[in-house]
Amino acid sequence: MTTETVPAPGTAPVDGEALLQVDALVKHFPIRQGLLQRQIGAVRAVDGVAFTVRAGETLGVVGESGCGKTTTGRLLVRLLEPTAGSIRFEGRDITHLSTGAMRPLRRDIQMIFQDPYSSLNPRHTVGTIVGAPFRLQGVKTEHGVKKAVQELLELCGLSPEHYNRYPHEFSGGQRQRIGIARALALRPKLIVADEPVSALDVSIQAQVVNLLDDLQGELGLTYVIIAHDLSVVRHVSDRVAVMYLGKVVELGGRDSLYHAPLHPYTVALMSAVPVPDPKRKQQRERILLTGDVPSPVNPPPACRFHTRCWKAQEICRQVEPPLRELRSGHLVACHFPENEPSPG
Amino acid sequence: MKRPHLRTGTGTVTAGEGPPDSAFLSVRDLRIHFDTDDGLVRAVDGLTFRLDRGRALGIVGESGSGKSVTSLGIMGLHRSGRARVTGEVWLDGEELVNADPERVRQLRGRKMAMIFQDPLTAMHPFYSIGRQITEAYRVHHPDVHRKQAHERAVEMLARVGIPQPDKRVDDYPHQFSGGMRQRAMIAMALVNDPDLLIADEPTTALDVTVQAQILDLIRDLQRETGSAVVIITHDLGVVAEIADDILVMYAGRCMEHGPAEQVFSRPQHPYTWGLLASMPRINRERQDRLLPIEGNPPSLIRVPPGCPFHPRCRYALLTDGRSNTEVPPLVPVDADDPDHTVACHLTPEDRQRIFSEDVAPGL
Ligand SMILES: Nc1ncnc2c1ncn2[C@@H]1O[C@H](COP(=O)(O)OP(=O)(O)OP(=O)(O)O)[C@@H](O)[C@H]1O
Ligand SMILES: Nc1ncnc2c1ncn2[C@@H]1O[C@H](COP(=O)(O)OP(=O)(O)O)[C@@H](O)[C@H]1O
Ligand code: SF4
Ligand code: SF4
Ligand SMILES: [Mg+2]
Ligand SMILES: [Mg+2]
């Protein structure tokens, strides 16, 4: 791919350095009522989230529906205005940048959406869709936009002949590839992908997961991948953040987290994942969480998980457990963690 | 009413034809085709299987493979459209495809019931949960008093694990969470103690935590009542949790069918291999790459000739051209294992070799 104005070497963080830093990030959606639309409460969708994404890595974000994953993703790409907290990209505070000030950054930060059916304009050809970022950003390409788009299509496993076709002529997996091609057009550094494969069949999911993997290797991309499927997240992530009711309750390296999860919620989530092996169903111990996620309008006080936690004690209802590092690089917010490393 | 495309039988089955076997549910050569402007959609094309009471059959396949059309076909819910339904569906000794639609209506809801992926589309937004369960009950128990029917609704909600059922019974569907709505729909489906329950993607829209609750619930209720269950899903993990038997469907046909343990431990069909190999697993170290099935499922208007899977199959070349021309019949895997059947031209030797060398190491 040959786009002009590639950032000067040296400005990009080296692999492993923080590309994105999120601190105490909050997003409350006001609930209004009545003639005067007075605010009577708020949906506390994201309520104090902190993490770092290092250049070249993939951070997976998991949690039940309504836990704030999508809202977090939309905050990161600044599709939503944060209520509080900060977002730093390459060391620069972008939390409250205006639309105009954000525009150059749009090239560096891109989002891929969940639904390959509704996220592409049905009246536009593939060429128009994938070429739009060049036009919007006024980027000149060496051999014209068409050539650049066709190269992108090939990079994503589509055929250059698809240029003049419309989204409805494609299968779900192919549409997701079109969405990925569009996101890659301006050679972003960071891609936030919200449930990029959950609308796809397993056989096709694997094609798209492999594509994301190849592109990361080839283009040195950094990913934040949001998914509710813990098996997919295990496969794609280097580190994983587990969210519950607007908070990160556990954050750690993939292997540490999947081998010995610390938060009871993570343990319960993992135990609920069905495994394609009928022999295993008799042996395994499943922790059944009762009920659903409580409403984020009135989240339970202190530890938000205490209403569903089998280990809850009085202190869990009184004192919010801070996120602390129990193993190297592995943090948890719980008074009585599971699999706690023995002291010494 | 005149329905041009339908064999709206009068209940007359040719003399001498009886139930093909003693199975509680027996589907024979079921075909469901739709006339569309683009051509004939062969959504189900010659499906045969049987299911006994007390057992759960899992039907798996990619989207568009004909799973939902099959379940609606068994329930006799295709009659009004442009659907052409042929073949036989025997339920407890009674044939349904050629039966009087009125008779099928009587059986629906009482002898056989269905739960859907999205409870909101199956429930009426303006009636309370309790009223909807009550109506479902009174359709088949017209003599029952309103009050008794209400008690029955509360009892059913309790049985599916809704807390405070006597209060929640008056709630409307939107006041329930996704998981509770799915429970309420199960309560509605089970209110008349059906002998056959068909669940079409009952947990697909739910979180894993709630999915686990619902699967446990379906399993417990089945144990209690000894009913037969058909569970339709694209998630092999879900079928492994709940199914006794598995039917793998592709392009409207059965590719492989057998006891769950067999299908998972000794899968026989290249498509089944593809499904098993492509999924990431939570209980496995990350391997370098997932193994997708290349290509896409076919259009059911232009189903590939021969084995419908051949354009995507890596082993089609090993069958002397038969994969591209001859439809493989569904035959037993081997003599010791008559219940495990597969539709594939590979020789048993080739299949054994490919499985142990190529497939098993990746599972
Ligand atoms: N009423 C209809 N008219 C025409 N075609 C139909 C109709 N209903 C279903 N089909 C087609 O039949 C095929 C099988 O559909 P079906 O809904 O059974 O698939 P499925 O396996 O349940 O898929 P999914 O997992 O996406 O729900 C599809 O190609 C579908 O488009
Ligand atoms: N625009 C909005 N107005 C009000 N509430 C919202 C809005 N967007 C999201 N929410 C609420 O915020 C919570 C978190 O949502 P979301 O981030 O979409 O969850 P997830 O992606 O994990 O499913 C949910 O309770 C959701 O209903
Ligand atoms: S802090 Fe208490 S309630 Fe919260 S997860 Fe830990 S043990 Fe459970
Ligand atoms: S019949 Fe041929 S194409 Fe079909 S699954 Fe078997 S080997 Fe593959
Ligand atoms: Mg979401
Ligand atoms: Mg379906």
Image (cartoon, grey):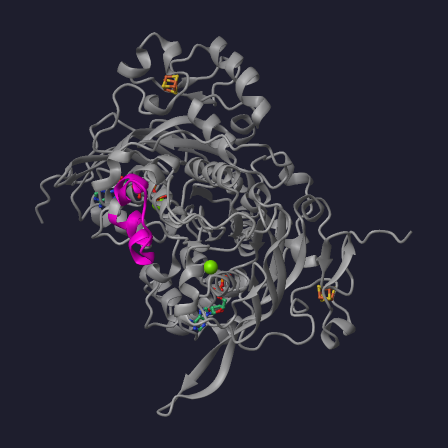
Q: Is residue A116 left or right of residue B240?
A: left
The reply to whether residue A190 is in sight is: yes
Residue B119 lies in quadrant:
bottom left
Secondary structure that dominates the magenta span: helix
x 37%, y 10%: residue: B319
Residue A138 is one of the magenta-drawn residues:
yes
Please identify the quarter of the rendering in which residue B13 is found. top left
| Residue A31 included in the magenta stretch of the image | no
Looking at the image, can residue B173 be seen? no
Side of A76 relative to A272 (left or right): left
In the drawing, does residue B120 fall left or right of residue A65?
left
Q: Nearer the viewer, residue A128 or A252?
A: A128
| Residues shaded magenta | A128-149
Q: Residue at x 54, y 44 (%)?
A: A232
**How far from the left and from the top, in percent, is residue A29?**
47, 76
Look at 9% across and 49% down and name the residue there.
B1
Q: Which image quarter is the C terminus of chain B in?
A: top right
Where residue A223 appears, x then y in whole percent?
Answer: 53, 49
Please state the quadrant of the image where ligand 3 appears: bottom right
Give coordinates of residue B265: x percent, y percent. Answer: 57, 26
Vertical order, B100 against B41 (above or below):
below
